[in-house]
Amino acid sequence: MRQITVIEHLLLHQKENPLATGNFTRLLTELILAAKIISRAVNKAGLMDVLGETGEINVQGEEVQKLDEFANRVIIHRLQRSGVLCAMASEENADIIEIPEKYSKGKYFLVFDPLDGSSNIDANVSIGTIFSIYKQEKDTDYPTLGELLQKGSQQVAAGYFLYGSSTMLVYSTGQGVHGFTLDPSVGEFLLSHPNIMIPKKGKIYSVNEGYFPFWDDKTKQVIASFKDVSAGKSSYSLRYIGSLVADFHRTLLYGGIFMYPKDCRDPKKPRGKLRLLYEASPMAFLVEQAGGMAVDGEQRILDILPEELHQRVPLFIGSATEVKKVLDIYKS
Ligand code: AFP
């Protein structure tokens, strides 16, 4: 079988793909390079002094960076020079990241979570980088936060890099979902999972059940429905990694549902944990492209207009059968 790289794949589908322009190709190329650098650091995490708290001094006398801060810096450093972005937003930065005057600008916004699941790093659990790309709608040199706060349905591309037993890129430009695996011997991501479709129904539910006491009654009913084996209902297995990219990747390939419901510890302020822009929206874009669904319990994630950069949202994402079941229970 001929081995196809990400950029070859993008160019081969140029006709169907309005994004296969030089600028988007440049953006993807830079992101891939950043991910290769992060992947190399993640693979050596146990060997190098990349673990530990910021502020320590490593054997070379350099300041030790936490891996998530390292990943953040790598992406910002490479992408701000790409000439195709008008601004960025990172899960690690409080505010929008402007492109310095000395670099040329483009028309894309890049929104990213540099190292999601980073509390799992020390245990060698799979982690990932999530990204989402929007287009600037107005023709201004200094885009405002308001311009970046677009509905998930306006994403022009989204995806993630998974640093697991192998390093993978899974992404979509709105023409299906495609997965590429990094072949370390040639240093390229090669097409390994073309046109990923999520099964219509799965056998796995995924949720942090430790939070059971903090859920409202409807949410408790939702989770109970996946344990209900009465009257011949099929049984589900429970899997929960605690690293969204890894939990989502399994859900995409095997089907079923991943849930992070709202926490009602403070009944006046029930809230989800996952961030709309950095986690929920890009995964929702991918799952819908793969034939699945993503909702907050009531509405489609992609229809939510963000009000702030770090907005949190409850998330139910996966196969259509299981997500519809959740919607039915919340509606009842
Ligand atoms: P960290 O990046 O702090 O490890 O958080 C990971 C995460 O945002 C997401 O990747 C997981 O799905 C979720 O949090 C796990 O949260 P709980 O530990 O509360 O289950």
Image (cartoon, rainbow, N blue to C red):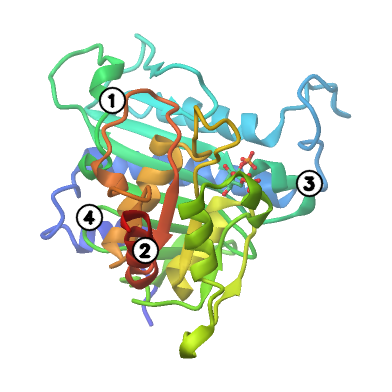
Q: On the rendered image, what quadrant is the C terminus found in? A: bottom left
Q: Is residue 79 above or below residue 296?
A: above
Tell me the SS state at disc 1.
helix
Q: Position of residue 20 (x, y in %)?
A: 20, 50
Going from N to C along the chain, the mark reached first, 1 or 3, is: 3
Residue 52, above or below 295: above
Q: Amino acid at mark 1?
A: Leu
Q: Which label sits in the foreground, 2 or 1?
A: 2
Q: Is residue 45 above or below residue 1?
A: above
Residue 148, numbered circle: 1
Q: Within the displayed image, which quadrant is ligand 1 positioned in?
A: top right
Helix or strand or loop: what does disc 2 sit on?
helix
Q: Identify the image quadrant of residue 85.
A: top left
Q: From the viewer's perspective, is residue 70 above or below residue 213?
A: above
The image's mark for residue 323 is 2
| C-alpha separation, residue under disc 1 versus residue under disc 3 | 34 Å
Q: CA distance from mark 3 to mark 2?
A: 33 Å
